[in-house]
Amino acid sequence: MTKHLILAALAAVAVGQPVWAQGAPASPSVAVAHSDLDLRTEAGIKTLDRRIWRAVVEVCGAAPGYDLAGKNDVRECRRETRALASVQADVVVANATRAEPIRVSSIRK
């Protein structure tokens, strides 16, 4: 009987631990600077596009060649992340006089 009470007490203590101690991981992000580019030109826009792609690759990471599911996850992350970053880039190009960095963030955890 005493063993059951001890086990029940230990189980109650283990279950009652606060969950807030474990923070949710933040999505990785990279700022893409563009203040040095003339976004009124095709060359400036292409350079910005290359910088965004490098940031997307960095944020989404890579999967080993043998991990097909991981490679598909990375491919999907890159596609979705690039689409979100492209929307920001379109706004920045439209407002070429502003000098705010573009924040590329993965939507995956």
Image (tube, rainbow, N blue to C red):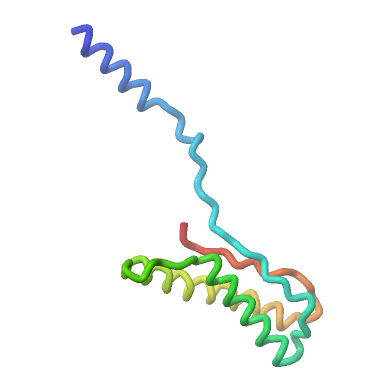
| Quadrant in the rendering for residue 45 | bottom right
Judging depth in this view, the residue of 1 and 60 nearest the camera is 60
| Quadrant in the rendering for residue 59 | bottom right
Of all residues, the one furthest to the left in this rendering is 1
Q: Is residue 43 above or below residue 32?
A: below
Task: Indicate the position of residue 37 as horizontal and vertical percent values.
Answer: 76, 81
Task: Indicate the position of residue 73 as horizontal and vertical percent values.
Answer: 39, 68
Position of residue 33 in the picture relative to residue 88 (left or right):
right
Q: Quadrant of the N terminus?
A: top left
Point 45% across, 67% down: residue: 62
| Quadrant in the rendering for residue 74 | bottom left
Task: Indicate the position of residue 94 as horizontal and vertical percent values.
Answer: 72, 83
Of all residues, the one furthest to the right in this rendering is 97
Of all residues, the one furthest to the bottom in this rendering is 42
Task: Indicate the position of residue 75 as horizontal and vertical percent values.
Answer: 42, 73
Point 62% across, 82% down: residue: 49
Judging depth in this view, the residue of 85 and 73 nearest the camera is 73
Position of residue 18 in the picture relative to residue 42 (left or right):
left
Point 35% across, 27% down: residue: 15
Of all residues, the one furthest to the front in this rendering is 65
Point 72% across, 69% down: residue: 101
Position of residue 54 in the picture relative to residue 21 (left or right):
right
The count of marks equals 0
Judging depth in this view, the residue of 83 and 28 nearest the camera is 28
